[in-house]
Image (cartoon, rainbow, N blue to C red):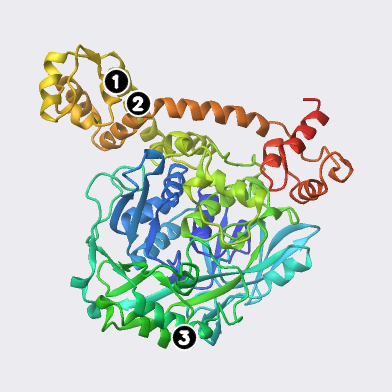
Amino acid sequence: MRLDYDVIVIGAGHAGCEAASAAARLGSTTLLITMDMNKIAQMSCNPAVGGIAKGQIVREIDALGGQMGIVTDRSSIQFRMLNRSKGPAMWSPRSQADRMHFSAEWRAILENTPNLYMWQDSVSSLKIEGGVVRGVVTTMGIEFGARSVVLTAGTFLNGLMHVGPVQQEGGRVSEPASHGITEQLRELGFATDRMKTGTPVRLDARTIDFSLAEEQKGDEDFHHFSYLPGVKSELKQRSCYIVFTNEKVHEVLRDGLPESPLYNGQIQSIGPRYCPSIETKIVTFADKTSHQLFIEPEGETTHEMYLNGFSSSLPWRIQFEALSHIPALANVQAYRPGYAIEYDFFDPTQLTHTLETKLVENLFFAGQVNGTTGYEEAAGQGLVAGINAHQKASGGEPFTLARNEAYIGVLIDDLVTKGVDEPYRMFTSRAEHRILLRQDDADMRLTERSYRMGLATEERYQIMCRKRKVIEDLIDFARNYSVKSSIINPHLEQEGLQPLKQGAKLYDLILRPQLTIEMLAGMIDELDALIQSFDEDLRLGAVEAAEIKIKYNGYIAREEMIADKLSRLEKVKIKGKFDYSKILQISTEGRQKLEKIDPETVGQASRIPGISPSDVNILLLLLGR
């Protein structure tokens, strides 16, 4: 039995799985420790991956050589591209997944990854010597040594679940909490606090009247998460359904508020603003007479359904009485009630951009222990932490992502620079360069970097190169191909579009909002022939990407120029150059914030809440700039 490893990962949730997989594939001997090997990458809450901004993160994980996109595609039971009515910077892929299949796919990947080993146990403490982590100690009393350790304990650190007045220790229903690590790190000076999240009731589909619900089917086109060809689901596709609460439902919930742990003082921790419980909704939006709920299947064949939008910690009787007043759920039976869970997290400003802790060397945090919420945010952090755990163990260079490179870069920079005062969830609005961070081009942004580092495979890199060549060829063709008005006008008039007064370049036609490359290929034989000559496995995605680059070229160029200007501040290093307490020209709040965060660059300093533009100018003046 091996007791020493390069990297140890604590926890096999979405962050832990990505961290362990990345570290091992980069060459580190890696041990993944989990309480239950039958709950690998468990979808603790909704059985879905992606969504607004979250879908972009999953595509970035895939572009970097991570596994979440592949696992999701293989276990998908419905795929939708959200926000198609808006610009491409807002398009966000989302997939319903078979929860059991998702977990099984992840376990199969982990068990067949060279250098990766698993151990079923709970970690009770970290081995720390001279400010450097050296390994872990488990509840079985086993000591494992490591050069780097990644903590991805999710909601398990001192986890406490609530259903009305009933409280149970645990990180998930029927799973024990983890004790010891928070207390140990707090003694070392780590700032820690409590957060709260919740999950809804699970319903039996056999007792739902779906004729009284609105059916929501998935898309039937080429979109999916992974950029690799041939990665697809063989599972039966299923619909979701929409229902609404009503005044009678709200009346029952309001009457039950005195018994809600959220409102009677039983829960004191910080809850999520953007995924509130149903009782929070009726209080915060008291003027609304109804709220939309989604009935989502948990798998291909199961009758278990997830009631998205109805998270609650109310007593089970109140939850079920309220649901009985929704016509489609009048006779519903449930598998279990919704519950809230409180857990420990650590102030993420105690981390560097590699997700290594500032207080203990070679110790990395990823996922909900950093105050985030969501599978995707956790997986993105896990991937970066796993890469850097390997790099630190092997003497490699740190790996970080800038805000103009990836949503993952925005996520991590927000965490380590601004901290959190509520569970952090990614939105497109958080990214100032979101036109550059589209879901269609994550491979163009990130795959080559990952390939040079050794994580993205040769196959993935060559696919990216082929796609780039197709996009370039198509754009070049559009710039140079002249369209005669006599040939194109009959087609335009048939579509009810303005005809050409004279010939034009194909590129200019594509710029028209009403026209797409696909439509034009049906009108221009040479264009259709070019498209058909491209490899089938990347044809549709490359055509879409080329069209976006053409239609939004002006916006993209402008955003690149702005990003380039801002990136200059990211190259001005200031870490270790100042004693901020002595720079009296900066406000007291500014000095305190700068001392706490100890930013790496002037760019990071400029994003710290409380740091004014004049404070930044003072730093630049002191640097002689």
Residue type at mark 1: give it. Answer: Tyr
Quadrant in the rendering for residue 462: top left
Query: Would you say 468 lies left or right of 279 here?
Result: left
Q: Position of residue 322 (x, y in %)?
A: 37, 81
Q: Quadrant of the C terminus?
A: top right
Residue 154 in sight from this viewpoint: yes
Residue type at mark 3: give it. Answer: Pro
Q: Earlier in the sequence, mark 1 or mark 2?
A: 1
Residue type at mark 2: give it. Answer: Ile
Quadrant in the rendering for residue 171: bottom right
- Report the Cα–Cα distance between label 1 and label 2: 7 Å
Name the element at disc 3: loop
Residue shown at 56%/79% (left/top)? Answer: 263
Q: Which mark is residue 550?
A: 2
Q: Which mark is residue 507?
A: 1
Residue shown at 53%/64% (left/top)? Answer: 272
